[in-house]
Image (cartoon, rainbow, N blue to C red):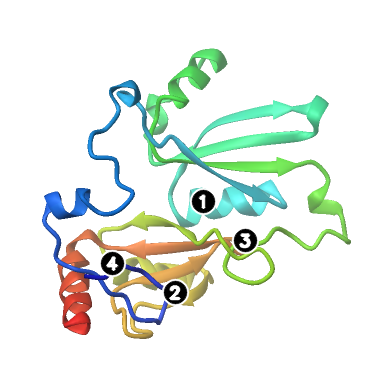
Amino acid sequence: NRVGYTRVGCTRTMSKLTVSQLQSLPGVCAETPRETDGYMLQQTMLRIVDPKPSLDFYTRVLGMTLVCKLDFPDMAFSLYFLGYVKKEDIPEDPTARAAWMFGLPGLIELTHNYGTENDPDFKGYADGNSEPGKGFGHIGVSVRSVEAACERFQALGVDFVKKPEDGKMRNLAFIRDPNGYWIEILEPSNAAQFVEWATDNHS
């Protein structure tokens, strides 16, 4: 049985694996090392050209909260951490805030190297989905309704890579942030149809 995922608009194939079969795939460690107890995926870092449009996009368009900002003037860069947290939960003390923030899962870290926003010769960063530099694909944001979210994105003038009705994979969208990074917009309630569609195409 094949298990795979290809780019938007291409065939996706997978099998209806049991948990045991899933954990028996080549390369998967049979027993999670006890030493990794307490590990979590805390952040994904994206380099940005200009903080202002990026912060506007992630806070206004995607509804994230700016959790923490760390400045490193001697090294000429700043870090912005964003995620889906309540503003009232953010500690007021900067040191306590940083400690609290690094204990949160699933944050986006935006890295701004000073001067890129005013450099006419700077061409931007590779988005990972085009040559050269293909590798990184996208981040994913789960929403209550892909249709409603995309109607709002459309009204806000967001750039779409794929709309929900495009291609073979329906009820799934991809948008671009101001730096060209792809963001998958998905709805958990649609998961069953993706599995069924993929299995039918594989049979």
Residue 99 at what x, y percent from top left? 48, 18
Q: Is residue 57 above or below residue 98?
A: below
Residue farthest to the front, as pictured: 26
For disc 4, the neighbor class at 10 Å (few under 14, some 14 to 19, many from 20) is some
Observer-nearest of 189 and 193? 193
The residue at the point 46 percent across, 74 percent down is 154
- Local SS, label 4: loop
For marks 4 and 1 on the same chain, the one whose residue lies earlier in the sequence: 4
Q: Is residue 40 above or below residue 12?
A: above
Q: Amino acid at mark 1?
A: Tyr
For disc 2, the neighbor class at 10 Å (few under 14, some 14 to 19, many from 20) is few
Mark in front: 2 vs 4:
4
Mark in front: 2 vs 3:
2
The residue at the point 15 percent across, 67 percent down is 192
What is the number of the mark on residue 7? 2
Instruction: Give the Cα separation between the discs numbered 2 and 3.
Output: 21 Å
For marks 2 and 1 on the same chain, the one whose residue lies earlier in the sequence: 2
Q: List the residue tagged with mark 3.
A: 178
**Direction from residue 89 to residue 45 in the image, left or right:** right
Q: List the residue tagged with mark 1.
A: 58
Instruction: Give the Cα separation between the discs numbered 2 and 4.
Output: 14 Å
Observer-nearest of 140 and 26? 26
- Local SS, label 1: helix
Residue 124 appears in which quarter of the rendering?
bottom right
Mark in front: 4 vs 3:
4
Q: Are marks 4 and 3 in contact (CB under 8 Å)?
A: no
**Direction from residue 110 to residue 1 in the image, left or right:** left
